[in-house]
Image (cartoon, grey):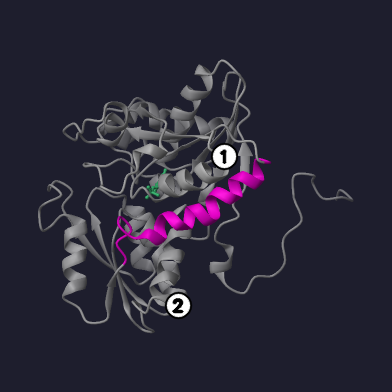
Amino acid sequence: MPDSPSPHITPAPGITTSVLDLIGNTPMLQVRKFDTGLCNLYLKLENQNPGGSIKDRMALNMVEAAERDGKLKPGGTIIEATAGNTGLSLALIAQQKGYRLILVIPDKMSQEKIFHLRAMGVEVIITPSNVTYDHPDYYQNKARSLAASMAGAFYIDQFNNPANAEAHERTTGPEIWEQMEHKVDAVICGSGSAGTILGLGRFFRARSPDTEIILADPKGSVLGPYVQTGVQPKAGSWLIEGIGKEFVSPNLDLSLISQAIIVDDIESIRTVRELLLKEGVLGGSSTGTLLAAALRYCRQQKTPKRVVTFVCDSGSKYLSKIFNPKWLKDNGIPN
Ligand SMILES: Cc1ncc(COP(=O)(O)O)c(C=O)c1O
């Protein structure tokens, strides 16, 4: 036995009495084995939140804001439309705080997320993915109408809830700022509900206006083209989960975003698989989009920059998809 512990193992913090206290304060890892040109690239490991994703922060903040506003009473029901990660975060929070949770989820989402939710006792309603956003079965419309029909139910509505972006403005932004010792040239993030990009955009505009906020968007989503041209194209489809949109939400404040980088499914998936092989980090599909965009940005820079992006969730949720040779083949993605 060595007489001193490995220098890689940092001392453990003290005892915590609630899993909710473990949300946030996630580590920052410098990428070492990719070509980052003149830049240094850092990954904020949001997969290390107890619910497994970046969504823990905003889910906790939305629930606690609803409690403070009297919209959620003890023993009440939380309803949400979610592609999965917000649902897992809400499941943890609802369980710890004693709320019933009903989630409405589009059917393209990975089985692992749905198994996980059901194992936590969540009631899951699956809706078709192939309906347009004005259809009553579109997952957000379905969640809204369900909440309106149930007494004591509160529709969290992450897409329009100000406590979503506020969580990132108050926690994610300041953590990045401190971890990076007040030197951040660019932050590259995806957008689903737009909470992360709006919250970080507001934080950095106030604290460090020269920090660029860059959108990484899957090809097929309308957000990237909209940021680039101001015109909203017809939506396509994409395999990456959790980011990209079929329409631009009115709350997306373009003045906070300096540019968009669009990444297709093949490049996203190849990049996240490379991340596992090179750096030993098992990221989810969106991590591939963010990292590919960040690498492209880094390699284009003519001066050294400090760039931050995210591992938003863990690849363990996608083992049957992007890490499964059969699924890759069936979806025309080179292995
Ligand atoms: C899987 C996943 N979910 C959600 C988000 C963030 O989306 P938002 O805060 O816009 O909902 C990201 C961001 O990259 C993501 O990768």
Q: Which residues are magenta?
A: 156-181
Q: Is residue 89 at all visible to an observer of this figure?
A: yes
Residue plotted at (27% across, 81% down):
152
Disc 1 CB within 8 Å of nearest ligand 1 atom: no
Q: Is residue 230 left or right of residue 290?
A: left
Is 28 a magenta residue?
no
Mark 1, residues whose alpha carbon is within 10 Å: few (<14), some, or many (≥20)? some
Where is residue 172 shown, x and y percent of the image? 53, 51
Numbered marks: total: 2
Q: Quadrant of the C terminus?
A: top left
Residue plotted at (56% across, 57% down):
24
Residue 103, by quadrant, is bottom left
Amino acid on which the number 2 mark rests in the picture: Lys
Q: Which mark is residue 208?
A: 1
Residue 25, by quadrant, is bottom right
Is 167 a magenta residue?
yes
Residue 260, by quadrant, is top left
Sequence order check: which comes first, mark 2 or mark 1? Answer: 2
Where is residue 329 shown, x and y percent of the image? 29, 30
Q: Is residue 61 left or right of residue 34?
A: left
Magenta-drawn stretch, dominant element (helix, strand or loop): helix
Tag 2 secondary structure: helix
Q: Nearer the viewer, residue 120 or 141?
A: 141
Q: Which residue is labeled 2 in the image? A: 97
Where is residue 58 shown, x and y percent of the image? 44, 59
